[in-house]
Image (spheres, rainbow, N blue to C red):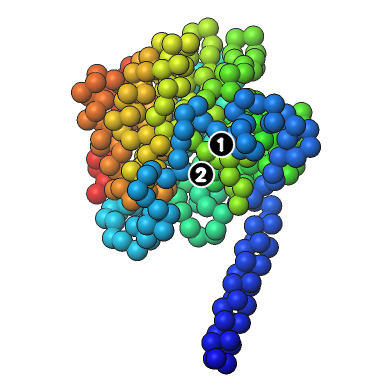
């Protein structure tokens, strides 16, 4: 009995220490802040905020029926999953973004879902992650060799910092801190401004929006805040900030930024309202049957492209971080074959390559096929 009692005390003590250590660790600045005050009052007025959390247009479980979190973790960390990382550095190049003229309409992809665009003289940066990892735990979810060619110092001043949601592979604490003095405006979903305020951004810089709102950046460029099918959360908080997709519109071009999203009715709805769309960025990678409702599989990427009425597809959410158990190049191989079958032109530059937005009909190299 004495042994059982001592063992019980030790186990409880260890549990208390672990809980306490976790609580203290999660008080760090990189976890951001929860919406409060006027910001929370505005959230409560949103049609997307139901029962104290943000919800999707259609029921969306965090895990597919039949899967458990313990099973997912076991498969991720203890089962053998071949080729989840490339065997050699990812090819990349470096465009001098500081020397751009305002007349150039162009984009550069930084890997995963991060990219820079200049349209009608407006400089837009989307979901930048330059810290080298996509996790709050140091040394985990590290960027592949070759993918970290750029730093914030390589960027010009940013007119619009566009954030799709607050997960660590899209909202990177270190990068956001370094961008503070370069950024004029942050456009993000409701609640995400609490993170930016915590990290020293002014209220004048932060523009939080609900789905179906429009932001006029200049007389010629507008950004429409639109639905996605996903979730949000940093630390122990989940679904307390709003995830979104975006439609960037000028008189000559429409570009859709899908953020992270599972397949849903919003794609067809957006296509009917805004189509045809010249270029769609859609997440094509880090998918798994266990979370198929919140990320697109390649076949669904093709269907979403058709629903959107998009003339061209830029598959993103791959080639920088391993967040799923499929081979690292599987998403690109599958989307290449499916896009050829559907006659959908793919935009697949290497990281850092200059892409002229006025000349999107050229051929792009299948660079991933050169890596084992």
Give the image location of residue 25, x and y in percent: 64, 61
Q: Which residue is most to the bottom?
A: 2
Give the image location of residue 65, x and y in percent: 37, 44
Up the image or down, 311 lies above or below 319; here it is: above
Residue 213: image quadrant is: top right
Using the image as rendered, state which of residue 15 and residue 134 is in the foreground.
15
Q: Residue at x 41, y 10 (%)?
A: 276
**Secondary structure of the residue carrying numbered label 2:** loop
Read off the residue under disc 2: 169
Q: Is residue 210 visible?
A: yes
Q: Which residue is most to the front?
A: 1
**Side of 79 relative to 193 (left or right):** left
Q: CA distance from mark 2 to mark 1?
A: 9 Å
**Side of 195 relative to 331 (left or right):** right
Up the image or down, 351 lies above or below 266; here it is: below
Read off the residue under disc 1: 165
> The N terminus appears in which quarter of the rendering?
bottom right
Up the image or down, 4 lies above or below 349; here it is: below
Disc 2 crowd rating (10 Å Cα; few below 14, some 14-19, many 20+) is many
Q: Residue at x 47, y 29 (%)?
A: 58
């Amino acid at each position: 009995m004495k042994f059982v009692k001592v063992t019980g005390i030790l186990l409880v003590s260890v549990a208390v220490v672990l809980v306490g250590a976790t609580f203290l660790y999660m008080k760090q600045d990189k976890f951001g802040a929860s919406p409060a005050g006027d910001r929370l009052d505005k959230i409560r007025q949103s049609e997307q905020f139901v029962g104290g959390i943000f919800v999707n247009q259609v029921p969306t479980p965090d895990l597919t029926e039949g899967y458990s979190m313990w099973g997912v973790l076991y498969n991720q960390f203890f089962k053998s999953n071949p080729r989840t990382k490339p065997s050699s550095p990812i090819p990349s190049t470096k465009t001098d973004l500081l020397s751009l003229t305002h007349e150039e309409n162009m984009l550069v992809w930084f890997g995963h879902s991060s990219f820079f665009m200049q349209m009608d003289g407006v400089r837009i940066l989307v979901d930048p992650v330059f810290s080298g990892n996509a996790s709050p735990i140091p040394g985990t979810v590290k960027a592949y060799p070759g993918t970290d060619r750029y730093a914030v110092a390589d960027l010009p001043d940013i007119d619009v910092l566009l954030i799709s949601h607050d997960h660590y592979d899209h909202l990177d604490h270190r990068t956001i801190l370094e961008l503070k003095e370069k950024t004029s405006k942050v456009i993000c979903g409701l609640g995400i401004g609490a993170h930016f305020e915590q990290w020293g951004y002014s209220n004048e810089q932060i523009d939080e929006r609900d789905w179906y709102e429009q932001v006029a950046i200049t007389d010629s460029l507008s950004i429409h805040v639109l639905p996605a099918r996903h979730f949000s959360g940093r630390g122990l908080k989940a679904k307390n900030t709003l995830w979104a997709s975006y439609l960037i519109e000028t008189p000559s071009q429409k570009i859709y930024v899908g953020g992270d999203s599972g397949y849903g009715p919003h794609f067809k709805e957006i296509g009917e309202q805004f189509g045809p769309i010249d270029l769609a960025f859609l997440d094509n990678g880090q998918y798994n049957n266990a979370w198929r409702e919140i990320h697109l599989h390649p076949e669904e990427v093709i269907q979403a492209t058709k629903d959107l009425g998009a003339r061209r597809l830029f598959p993103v959410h791959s080639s920088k971080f391993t967040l799923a158990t499929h081979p690292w190049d599987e998403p690109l191989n599958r989307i290449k074959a499916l896009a050829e079958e559907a006659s959908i032109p793919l935009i697949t530059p290497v990281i850092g390559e200059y892409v002229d937005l006025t000349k999107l009909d050229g051929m792009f190299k299948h660079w991933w096929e050169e890596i084992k």
